[in-house]
Image: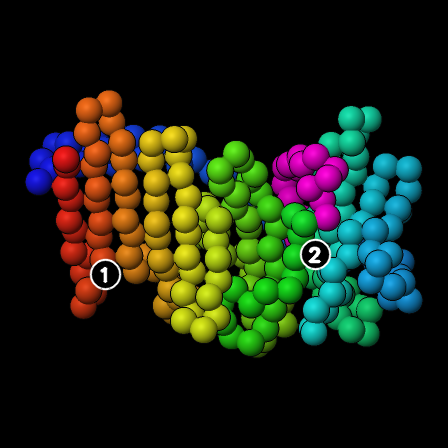
Amino acid sequence: MVTFKYLILFFFLIGCNKKQKQLEIIEPKRKEIKNDSSKSESDFKNKVNDSVYTYKRENRESFFYLFYSKDKNKNVSIDSIIIRNKSNNDIQKIKFKKNYFLPEYQTEYCFSAEEDINFDGFNDISLLNYYGNYNTSSSYWVYKKNQKKYNQVKSLDSIYNADFNNAKKEIYSLWRAGLDEFHDETYFWKNNNIVLKEEHIKYNTMDSIIEYSRKLINGKYIENGEKY
């Protein structure tokens, strides 16, 4: 069995590896944009001026416009998301305090409003915030019907490779840190919060393999560890 001291060192190493860039949001400000609802779905990219572009998505509730600019190397700097209702009235603006950058080829799949991440019957917003060799992560905003607006769920920002299973109402995350560390995690929603249900970690050292797992049972995490 793994000693307590060894487990502490192990999780310190994991904490060092799993660092995630967070997006900061400020209060929405109303901004009118040109109505392009007559455009077809194949024409969802639109040039506002010589440096600013929009990328359009649509779901049952709203239209979504991702505002971004491009530099001479075609790197994309994302500025804001403007949301309009089906009457083409502005209802919300999500503005990023600090722009972050993506290569232009990633723009087409970095932004979505077509997946129900909290399983309430309404599609939500996702925006890629990290893209690595093995892992990706996104920031998410869920639709609140009573507020008629989208609220960010910051606890999802650092969940890698999130896969939302509507049938089981669970979120799966399979990710790795380099060539020697592998994670398998399952989450669920409780009172609008993300809760870890179960995780399994496998870690290879120079002379051994460590496996650690914990599972939520009756409100408490049951832990197991083994070294061989």
168 relative to 137 in the view: left or right? left
Residue 204, disc: none
Q: Which mark is residue 216?
A: 1
Q: Residue at x 46, y 66 (%)?
A: 165
Q: Which badge, 1 or 2, is on the more N-terminal residue?
A: 2
Could you tell me which quadrant the N terminus lies in?
top left
Q: Residues within 10 Å of mark 1 (few under 14, many from 20)?
A: some
SS under mark 2: strand
Magenta span has 105? yes
Q: Principal SS element in the magenta part? A: strand
Tell me which residue sits at (27%, 35%) in the image. 203
Q: Amino acid at mark 2?
A: Lys
In the displayed structure, 84 sits above or below 66; it is: below
Q: Are marks 1 and 2 in contact (CB under 8 Å)?
A: no
Q: What is the CA distance from the residue labelled 1 to the residue labelled 2? A: 38 Å
The quarter holding residue 35 reads bottom right
From this viewpoint, is residue 96 visible? yes
Report the span colored magenta: 94-108
**In this figure, which residue is indicated by the disc labeled 2?**
93
Q: Residue at x 70, y 35 (%)?
A: 103
